[in-house]
């Protein structure tokens, strides 16, 4: 299943740090779920400090080359991307999914070229996406089951998938820019076409004073309710996944009531992601950023998790399909469920909460 080939000459390990100087692209076959399971195993992902003594290694000067390798991948310069990646102990994999017959390009640490895993993450690119968006899983361990959830959205046709390489207790990547994760985010999100970003997180509803049926909390991190969040909220509600949106609007405003009913947007501040650096960067560049928090029970129900991922992917296909990606998205988003239905649903939850 996991076959490894180096084009041209054999992969060499050289230099004082044991960094590879591969001259080609690795070729592998398998299935995407199995690949993601492997990339989130102990082989590729640093665990919690209490169970894994390996430290996260600050990338330092490797950041520039990591971003260059990612940028080369994005424009199809695979050989140059592989050569660049090898300089920092990474390898570029041409991965063929034998189940879906899809091809993905994978940037990951080359375990044969480094003395010890550094926790820099793995990054997957779809050369033939159905919708132009990045899906990010910055806490694949701390927010359990978010990696397979994000991978399912990616498998449905997204452009890129970013998976962190360390437990958040070793490196909380949404908090700092000097990480390979952020450099790949920047390289793939930017360019001539700005890509919307979905960042997948997890929460436990019983720890928050949220409406009783809340299964997802959405946010841009900036306090607004964008057209993208409106579409996601609409589709999630319609398909049985009650969602709410953090925002700083007047609670009685039309837009807040549309997504939250009687609940003020500030009620969800604990999951607002206002300091998330990928979100800050996306908003600064003018790209849409969507921070999605999935409840624990939803994430740990495989069938519901897969259904939720399919709904998110379907909404993103409407928002950022490859065919219509350049079309303006600032037109009003039609509502197919009457607003009174959503308000009634929210009123019911509020009544159960005692007001």
Image (cartoon, rainbow, N blue to C red):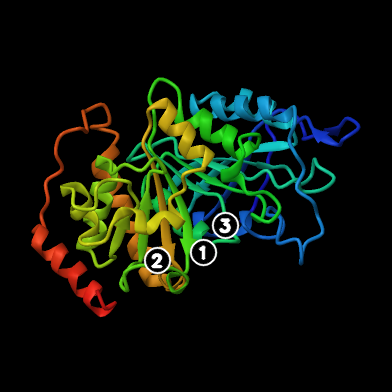
Q: Which mark is residue 225?
A: none
Q: Quadrant of residue 297?
A: bottom left
Pointer 1 local density, CA inside 10 Å: few below 14, some 14–19, many at least 20: many
> Nearest the camera: 47 or 12?
47
Determine the CA span between mark 2 and mark 3: 15 Å
Number of callouts: 3
Say which element carries label 1. Answer: loop
Residue at the location (59% across, 61% down)? 142
Say which element carries label 3. Answer: loop
Q: Which residue is mark 1?
A: 145
Judged from this view, the residue extending furthest toward the right is: 16
Q: On screen, 320 above or below 71?
A: below
Q: In the rendered view of the protein, which quadrant contains the N terminus?
A: bottom right
Judged from this view, the residue extending furthest toward the top is: 192
Q: Quadrant of residue 140?
A: bottom right
Asked if the residue at tag 2 contacts the one at tag 1, i.e. Cβ–Cβ closer than 8 Å, the answer is yes
Q: Which mark is residue 305?
A: 2
Residue 147 in view in this figure? yes
Say which element carries label 2. Answer: helix
Residue at the location (19% across, 47% down)? 255
Q: On screen, 69 above or below 113?
A: above
Q: Quadrant of residue 265?
A: bottom left
Pointer 2 local density, CA inside 10 Å: few below 14, some 14–19, many at least 20: many
N-term mark: 2 or 3: 3
> Residue 201, percent across and down?
48, 56
> Residue 312, percent across and down?
32, 53
Q: Which residue is mark 3?
A: 140
Determine the CA span between mark 1 and mark 2: 9 Å
N-term mark: 1 or 3: 3
> Nearest the camera: 342 or 90?
342
């Amino acid at each position: 299943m996991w076959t490894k080939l180096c084009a041209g000459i054999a992969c060499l390990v050289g230099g004082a740090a044991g960094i590879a100087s591969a001259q080609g692209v690795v070729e592998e076959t398998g299935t995407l779920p199995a690949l993601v399971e492997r990339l989130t195993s102990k082989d590729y992902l640093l665990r919690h400090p209490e169970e894994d003594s390996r430290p996260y290694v600050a990338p330092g000067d490797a950041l520039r080359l990591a971003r260059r390798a990612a940028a080369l991948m994005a424009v199809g310069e695979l050989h140059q991307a592989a050569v660049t990646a090898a300089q920092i102990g990474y390898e570029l994999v041409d991965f063929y999914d034998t189940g879906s017959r899809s091809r993905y390009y994978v940037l990951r640490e080359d375990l044969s070229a480094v003395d010890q895993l550094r926790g820099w993450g793995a990054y997957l690119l779809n050369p033939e996406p159905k919708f132009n968006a990045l899906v990010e899983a910055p806490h694949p361990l701390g927010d359990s089951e978010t990696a397979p959830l994000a991978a399912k959205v990616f498998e449905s046709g997204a452009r890129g998938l970013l998976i962190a390489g360390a437990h958040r207790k070793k490196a909380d990547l949404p908090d700092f820019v000097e990480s390979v994760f952020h450099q790949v985010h920047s390289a793939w999100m930017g360019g001539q076409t700005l890509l919307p970003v979905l960042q997948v997180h997890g929460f436990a509803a019983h720890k928050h004073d949220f409406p009783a049926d809340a299964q997802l909390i959405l946010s841009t991190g900036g306090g607004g309710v964008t057209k993208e969040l409106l579409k996601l909220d609409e589709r999630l509600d319609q398909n049985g996944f009650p969602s709410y949106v953090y925002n700083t609007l007047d609670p009685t405003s039309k837009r807040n009531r549309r997504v939250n009913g009687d609940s003020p947007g500030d009620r969800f501040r604990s999951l607002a992601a206002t300091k998330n650096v990928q979100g800050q960067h996306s908003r600064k560049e003018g790209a849409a950023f969507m921070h999605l928090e999935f409840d624990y029970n939803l994430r740990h129900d495989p069938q519901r998790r897969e259904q939720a991922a399919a709904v998110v992917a379907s909404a993103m296909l409407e928002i950022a399909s490859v065919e219509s990606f350049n079309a303006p998205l600032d037109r009003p988003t039609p509502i197919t469920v009457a607003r009174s239905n959503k308000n009634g649903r929210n009123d019911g939850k509020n009544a159960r909460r005692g007001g």
